[in-house]
Image (tube, rainbow, N blue to C red):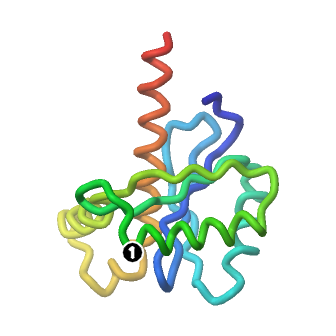
């Protein structure tokens, strides 16, 4: 895949959606927002994609440890299907997000962030991990092609 500008990633939860965006070169992922699932989330996502001129949206797909589609993954699929009705011209890629919450939790513990503060920022941090994983994959694929 040729990178044509920043990529936006979502970590979709029941109450909130973490959002991250890559730099234009696709090297790093940065947290940009946590969106409440209050009925306006689709408009907010569309606005973020427009602001960053992004045509690619990565959505964390929470498979089970065995790699199967469980109940949480089904909820994400429902969300993505509804999201497609609100967006046009955007490529949506489901990306395996197993272990992102565990990794984020361990990172917070290591740097001394307490549980109360963690709850406020974990969704965006998990979106960063999802996006960075995807960006790393793209770099590996590019090296294989060369």
As drawn, 72 above or below 106? below
Could you say whether the residue bearing mark 1 is in a helix, strand or loop?
helix
On screen, residue 106 versus residue 91, left or right, reads left
Of 128 and 92, which appears nearest the observer? 92
Indicate the quadrant containing the N terminus: top left, top right, bottom left or bottom right.
Answer: top right
On screen, residue 37 versus residue 113, left or right, reads right
- Residue in the picture at 33% in, 78% down: 118
On screen, residue 30 versus residue 108, left or right, reads right
Of 46 and 51, which appears nearest the observer? 46
- Residue in the picture at 60% in, 34% down: 25
Q: Quadrant of residue 24?
A: top right
Q: Quadrant of residue 113?
A: bottom left
Which residue matches tag 1? 71
Residue 140's x, y, as percent? 41, 26
Of 128 and 141, which appears nearest the observer? 141
- Residue in the picture at 47% in, 67% down: 124
Residue 85's x, y, as percent? 77, 68
On screen, residue 36 versus residue 111, left or right, reads right
- Residue in the picture at 47% in, 59% down: 60
Counting labels gives: 1
Residue 105's x, y, as percent? 25, 68
């Amino acid at each position: 895949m040729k990178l044509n500008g920043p990529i936006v990633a979502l970590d979709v939860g029941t109450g909130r959606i973490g959002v991250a965006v890559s730099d234009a070169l696709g090297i790093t992922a940065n947290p940009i927002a946590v969106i409440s699932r209050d009925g306006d989330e689709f408009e907010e996502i569309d606005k973020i994609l427009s602001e960053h001129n992004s045509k690619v949206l990565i959505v964390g797909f929470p498979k089970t440890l065995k790699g199967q589609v469980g109940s949480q993954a089904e909820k994400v699929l429902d969300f993505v299907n509804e999201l497609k009705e609100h967006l046009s011209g955007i490529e949506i890629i489901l990306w395996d997000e197993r272990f992102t919450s565990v990794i984020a939790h361990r990172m917070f513990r290591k740097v001394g962030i307490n549980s109360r503060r963690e709850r406020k920022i974990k969704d965006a941090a998990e979106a960063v991990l999802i996006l960075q994983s995807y960006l790393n994959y793209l770099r590996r694929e590019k090296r294989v092609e060369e």
